[in-house]
């Protein structure tokens, strides 16, 4: 008991990020910790005793995770800094080994004679997840997994090293985004052409990488005794309560109800951007005068966030203060900083950290709404004793962040000034339009892994057909790359994590239910939002939705209901 109290005391100690000490992980120490833990755990004389040991695991692995996060974060905020560059490399090296120790220990836990007691304490979800993870990996497929990683890196390199000439300058893909969404139609048309030219020059290479990936993953599945990669992919995504059949029914509802809804939105967008015919290069543009960007300096954006969260609720006020007080944001764009943005958590200090690169677009505000939604959930559940309760699966994690985007609608004038209405219009149209696309990415992968023998040309044909089903309004204007079923090659998730993408879609339709709810009763919706955040993943996905009063996306009628409610919002003005 004494030990536990100490851990608690230490954990609640507030500290600025820059003052957090860092010490390299000693792998000899990790090895002896796990050896002793595994031995003691096997010899435990009761469930209580084994659970006490498991709490030691929480503390130890919490410290390890904290150390790893600090090193990676400090490396990411200045990739030229030598000390943390070395530490980052070191972590890449030791990470698989730590994972292996964790797996070895979890096997002992899973096979415990006191399983009932432990399941009562740690939860059914955790044990189901252990089962799925044990079914997903085996030493005999490690060489294949290494090859898989190498193929993914090869794809990443092609995307990251792209040098796209445009108007006398050279762009990479992420910088090109600015001209792809230019308010000047001719500019964005030419920018899309430049992007298409680039992809045409590498499409054979990407086809080859993907072909190898599909065959590799299929072989992994076969060696583990699966018929094809789909089941294995589901297990790797920790689909612990819904499977292929449920997801199929979800996509069916989207095809039937959502696609006609989104098609109608496109008609409206025509007027908004002032064109007679929508072309694919108009797809990410929402207004004649361009998409709205936030006003003010990064400091002003952060201050607006502070004011917003103060007004939203006592819980968010405390959260944002805590983040600012302890310097847990690093959001300013700098040359030596790694690209992108994310949120992570430091268990030792019970503190979330947020990494981002502000660039003057509405993406900066997403950091304050979306990433802070993730961080807020982490903050709310910081005192949760059972670590497994926070092993979030993505369809749940994204509910916390995507719903926060809607809960903060009322404060967008602080960020967008007189274009806040435009921003809200864009946000809702964009969110709705995303849904069919997300399903298309998911269905594509199901077809691909069901028939791994397809040729690259046949895969492109599959995508081309799916475009007609899910995005019938999209006119690719006979572009030699995009009109020939190539679009998926720019969607990284298809390469990185098969079947991941649908999680965004599932979370999105739940977040929209919160939007409907808050427009009827903001306070009640917010209380239930807090409830789902606090539930974390204590229970299975659909049970939790039910408990909070939300409809499962898999159930017939949910999507139809949502389309009716959301239509009223999209077309009301
Ligand atoms: Zn997210």
Image (cartoon, grey):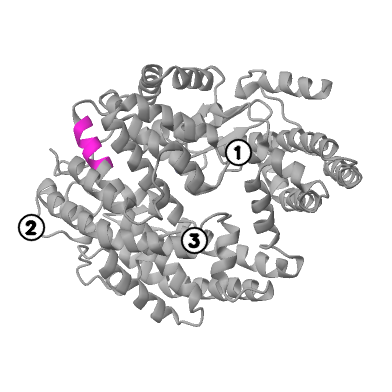
Residue 499 is tagged as: 3
142 or 46: nearer the viewer: 46
Q: In this view, does 72 lie to the left or right of 429?
A: right
Which secondary structure, mark 3?
A: loop
Q: Are marks 3 and 1 in contact (CB under 8 Å)?
A: no
Which residues lie in the magenta part? 420-427
Measure the C-alpha gap from mark 3 to mark 1: 21 Å
Kindly indicate the quadrant of the structure image that contains residue 283: bottom left
Q: Is residue 173 above or below residue 518?
A: below
How many neighbours does mark 3 have within 10 angstroms: few (below 14), some (14-19), or many (20 or more)?
A: many
Q: Which of 530 and 31 is in front in this view?
A: 530
Is most of the magenta stretch helix, strand or loop?
A: helix
Whether residue 421 is in magenta: the answer is: yes
Q: Which residue is drawn at 86% across and 42% down?
A: 37
Image x and y of residue 41, in percent: 86, 44
Cα separation between marks 2 and 3: 37 Å
Given this view, does label 2 or label 1 mark the residue nearer the observer? Answer: 1
Asked where in the image residue 257 lies, by quadrant, the reply is bottom left
Where residue 92 sits: x, y (%)?
Answer: 69, 49
Instruction: Specify which label sits upstream in the sequence, 3 or 1.
Output: 1
Q: What numbered label is drawn on residue 390?
A: 1
Q: Is residue 396 magenta?
A: no
Label 2's element? Answer: loop
């Amino acid at each position: 008991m004494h030990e536990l109290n100490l851990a608690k005391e230490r954990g609640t100690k507030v500290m600025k990020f820059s003052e957090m000490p860092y010490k390299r992980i000693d792998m000899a120490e990790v090895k002896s910790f796990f050896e002793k833990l595994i031995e003691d755990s096997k010899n435990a004389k009761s469930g209580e005793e084994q659970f006490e040991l498991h709490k030691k695991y929480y503390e130890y692995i919490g410290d390890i995770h904290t150390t790893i996060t600090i090193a990676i974060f400090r490396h990411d905020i200045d990739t030229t800094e030598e000390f943390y560059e070395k530490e980052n490399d070191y972590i890449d090296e030791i990470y698989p080994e730590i994972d292996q120790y964790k797996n070895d220990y979890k096997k002992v836990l899973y096979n415990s004679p006191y399983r009932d007691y432990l399941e009562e304490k740690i939860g059914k979800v955790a044990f189901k997840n252990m089962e799925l993870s044990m079914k997903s990996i085996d030493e005999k497929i490690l060489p294949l997994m290494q090859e898989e990683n190498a193929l993914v890196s090869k794809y990443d390199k092609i995307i990251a090293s792209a040098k796209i000439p445009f108007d006398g300058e050279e762009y990479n893909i992420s910088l090109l985004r600015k001209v792809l969404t230019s308010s000047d139609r001719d500019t964005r048309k030419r920018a899309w052409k430049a992007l298409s030219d680039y992809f045409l020059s590498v499409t054979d290479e990407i086809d080859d990488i993907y072909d190898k990936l599909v065959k590799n993953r299929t072989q992994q599945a076969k060696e583990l005794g699966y018929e094809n990669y789909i089941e294995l992919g589901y297990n790797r995504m920790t689909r612990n309560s819904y499977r292929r059949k449920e997801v199929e029914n979800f996509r069916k509802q989207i095809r039937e109800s959502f696609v006609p809804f989104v098609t109608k939105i496109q008609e409206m967008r025509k007027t908004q951007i002032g064109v007679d015919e929508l072309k694919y290069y108009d797809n990410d543009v929402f207004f004649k005068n361009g998409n709205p960007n936030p006003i003010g300096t990064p400091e002003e954006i952060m201050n607006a966030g502070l004011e917003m969260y103060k007004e939203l609720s006592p819980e968010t006020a405390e959260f944002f203060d805590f983040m600012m007080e302890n310097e847990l944001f690093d959001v300013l764009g700098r040359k030596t900083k790694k690209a992108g943005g994310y949120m992570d958590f430091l268990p030792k200090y019970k503190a979330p950290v947020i990494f981002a690169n502000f660039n003057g677009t509405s993406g900066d505000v997403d950091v304050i709404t979306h990433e802070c939604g993730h961080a807020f959930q982490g903050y709310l559940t910081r005192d949760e004793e059972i670590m497994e309760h926070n092993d979030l699966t993505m369809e749940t994690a994204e509910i916390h962040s995507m719903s926060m985007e809607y809960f903060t609608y009322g404060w967008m004038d602080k960020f967008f000034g007189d274009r806040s209405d435009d921003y809200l219009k864009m946000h809702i149209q964009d969110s709705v339009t995303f849904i069919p696309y997300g399903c298309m990415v998911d269905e594509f992968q199901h077809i691909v892994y069901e028939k791994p023998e397809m040729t690259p040309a046949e895969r492109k044909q599959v995508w081309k057909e799916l475009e007609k089903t899910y995005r019938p309004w999209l006119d690719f204007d006979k572009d030699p790359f995009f009109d020939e079923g190539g679009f998926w090659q720019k969607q990284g998730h298809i390469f990185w994590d098969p079947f991941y993408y649908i999680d965004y879609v599932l979370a999105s339709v739940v977040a929209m239910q919160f939007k409907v709810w808050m427009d009827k009763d903001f306070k009640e919706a917010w209380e239930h939002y807090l409830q789902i955040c606090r539930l974390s993943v204590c229970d299975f996905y659909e049970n939790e939705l039910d408990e909070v009063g939300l409809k499962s996306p898999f159930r017939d009628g949910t999507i139809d209901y949502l389309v009716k409610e959301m239509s009223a919002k999209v077309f009301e003005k």
